[in-house]
Image (cartoon, helix red, strand yellow):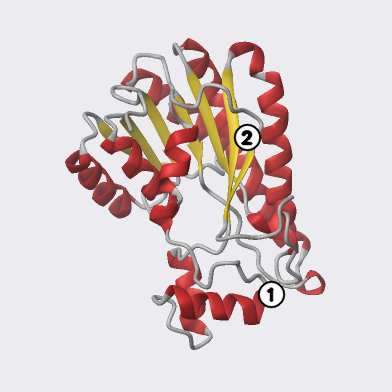
Amino acid sequence: MDLGLADATAVVVGGSRGMGLASARCLAEDGARLALVGRTPAFLDAAVAELAERGSPDVVGFAVDVGDAAAVDQLFVDIADRFDGALNVLINTVGPGAPGAFADLTDDQWREAVEDGVLGMVRCVRAALPLLRNAAWARIVNFSAHSTQRQSVLLPAYTAAKSMLTSVSKNLSLSLAKDEILVNVVSPGSIASESLVGWAISVGVDGSDPYRLMEAIDKYFGHPAHLPRAGLPEEIGPVVAFLASRRNSYMTGANINVDGGSDFT
């Protein structure tokens, strides 16, 4: 399907690895111009080279910590220069860590969860808004998590931050509707990201096997999906690409689960 992304301009925050990179691949294959934001230059360089091969006519990486407000402001000044002052797509994939049971989490870990899980997105949206308003059409896609709908005793700070991000995104969908900027949320379930695979290995499970990985998730987190396996990053990318595209012309304020099946909420 032609998503109407040829020569569109897109920023993917957290786009050098995992689900962010999987999303960027779909945009590149449809011909979008891309700016990837991450912390590690080596990962960014590898992703930029790959996405150019996949069809992006213009792809660049920016090594920026979105926890630094001044750096985020400068980032979007640089992106405005690169993309002639207009931006069609902003995708925010960066999320918090802070696993741990409620009684074990410190105040600093709660603050870190909100900083990493919400404020980075807020800074990026705020800085990007003038560019999004300058474009003929614009979309924002933010990553939440299915744990906001299916609680785990090991993820209270993570889930609280993701719930806040979902709420802010819903509010943005309302406030930006007058500008016809569509804002949606994707809530991945148990996806075989590098961090989740690494965790599985740490508890003695072959995380490279999505079926064994789901067994471990059920055992430790009580979050089994209806499907008997964990998801793959490449199963997120097409959903994000659609929400970010011109093909999505009337969906805003939605929270889309990509979780292998769970209770509808």
Name the secondary structure under disc 2.
helix
Does any portion of residue 131 appear in the rendered image? yes
**Residue 111 horizontal/vertical position (percent):** 72, 53
Task: Name the one closer to the observer, 19 or 253.
Answer: 253
Q: Does label 2 or label 1 sit earlier along the sequence?
A: 2
Mark in the foreground, 2 or 1: 1
Residue beneath the point at 77% across and 74% down: 104
Query: What amino acid is found at the position of numbered circle 1 in the picture?
Result: Gly
Query: What amino acid is found at the position of numbered circle 2 in the picture?
Result: Val
Label 1 Cα neighbours within 10 Å, binned few <14 / some 14-19 / many ≥20: some
Separation (CA) of disc 2 from disc 1: 31 Å
Query: How many numbered discs?
Result: 2
Hey, which residue is sitting farthest bottom in the picture? 204
Name the secondary structure under disc 1.
loop
Does any portion of residue 38 appear in the rendered image? no
219 vs 63: above or below = below
**Residue 32 horizontal/vertical position (percent):** 31, 29
Residue beneath the point at 60% across and 67% down: 225
Horizontal side, residue 163 vs residue 83: left or right? right
Hey, which residue is sitting farthest right in the picture? 103
Task: Name the one closer to the observer, 151 or 126.
Answer: 151
Hey, which residue is sitting farthest left in the picture? 53
Residue beneath the point at 43% across and 66% down: 194
What residue is pinned by disc 2? Answer: 122
The disc at residue 222 is 1
239 vs 75: above or below = below
Image quadrant where one finds the N terminus: top left
**Residue 141 horizontal/vertical position (percent):** 54, 36
**Residue 152 horizontal/vertical position (percent):** 73, 68
Check if mark 2's residue and mark 1's residue have beta carbons within 8 Å.
Answer: no
**For residue 171, which quarter of the picture?**
top right
Task: Name the one closer to the observer, 70 or 28.
Answer: 28
